[in-house]
Amino acid sequence: MVEYILHKTKEETALNTRKMYVSTPYNRVQAVEERLKKIFDEELKSEGSILVSYKPAVLSKLAKYLSGHISRPASIGIAGETASGKSTITLDIIDTIKSFATEFEIENAITRVNTDDYYYDRSEMVKAAGSFAEFAKNYDLDVPQALELELMSEHIKELLNGKSVFLPKYDMSGTAIRHDNHTLANPSKIIISEGLFTLTEKIKDAFEFKIYVDVRANVQKDRFFVRAEERGLGESANGIYQNASQKAEIYIRPCKQDADIVLSGEAVRARYKAFLNRLISIVQQENFRNKIIL
């Protein structure tokens, strides 16, 4: 009997010891969330930060994905005014994630769904007007109603459900042609979209993570007119800017309050990738422990 008790005690001791060193799923998520809070707060307090603000709840949600507790695909929606820097940030996110995926031989890491490709085809109206400039005088492209956001939402949901879809492609050269079923998009671990109206009412619920890119008005205005000159908009630039600014007040700026994360569109470009790499390091440590990174 004594031997039996001692044997059981040793077994229980060994089991309890193992429990001390094996994280439960909950503890693992909690530990990742604590690391995320440290990373976010350090960035938020730093000079020239890419972060303007974040909602604490996003850390819990992000921790579940990064730790592997949630394995389903994630969708990211990025919005902001024209010339805010959202497209540049999006491309940097895609580039950084693809680099990580290549290194770790991860297939189907990220798929981009470009909001601008969902503008309605208005090529016949452009032809009737004689030019895109004349067409634009009477047709407002700076409202969400100019895009088929319901179709975009359907495409994102299909990708998240593991289905391949054919995406449209809008010609931005001034023809207003939309080529439907143009580009095959395959499901992936991350679906990312950016655009003026990506977080507006008809589409925002398609995104698990909502990001708004904020920029000071004077910086955004300067960028806009540099871009306008490059595109040869001439005297029409002033009118286009005024209309875009007025419509942004109605449709785009209110999206900021729904965002999980607000990014600065004015930070040094390299800092976005550096911040994202800190998040990726968590994925690396949690899910690729056996691979050594030099």
Image (cartoon, helix red, strand yellow):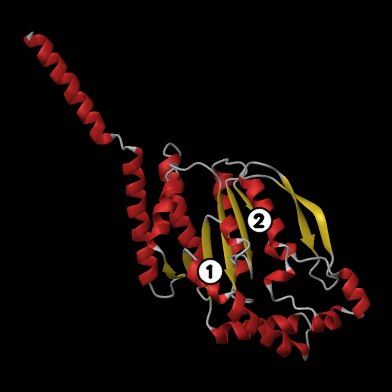
- Can residue 203 be seen in this snapshot? yes
Q: Quadrant of residue 233?
A: bottom right
Image quarter where the N terminus lies is top left
- Relative image position of residue 150 (x, y in whole percent): 69, 59
Q: Residue at image x 16%, y 16%?
A: 8
Whole-number angstrom distance, CA of label 1 to CA of label 2: 18 Å
Q: Position of residue 116 (x, y in %)?
A: 71, 66
In which quarter of the view is residue 180 placed? bottom right
Query: Whole-percent x and y of residue 234?
Result: 78, 88
Secondary structure under badge 2?
helix
Local packing at callout 1 (Cα closer than 10 Å; few below 14, some 14-19, many 20+) is many
- Using the image as rendered, state which of residue 74 and residue 145 is in the foreground: 145
From the viewer's side, name the closer residue of 98 and 160: 160
Point out which mark residue 203 bears.
none
Residue nearest the observer in this picture, 29 or 158: 158
Q: Which residue is mark 1?
A: 212
In the image, farthest residue toward the left = 2
Q: Is residue 72 left or right of residue 53?
A: right
Left or right of residue 141: residue 285? left
Above or below, 4 against 95 in this view is above
Query: Mark 2 Cα within 10 Å, few/some/many (few <14, many 20+)?
Result: some
| Label whose residue precedes the other's in the sequence (1 or 2) | 2
Residue 153's label in the rendered image is: 2
From the viewer's perspective, tell me whether residue 116 is left or right of residue 203: right
Most foreground residue, 199 or 175: 199
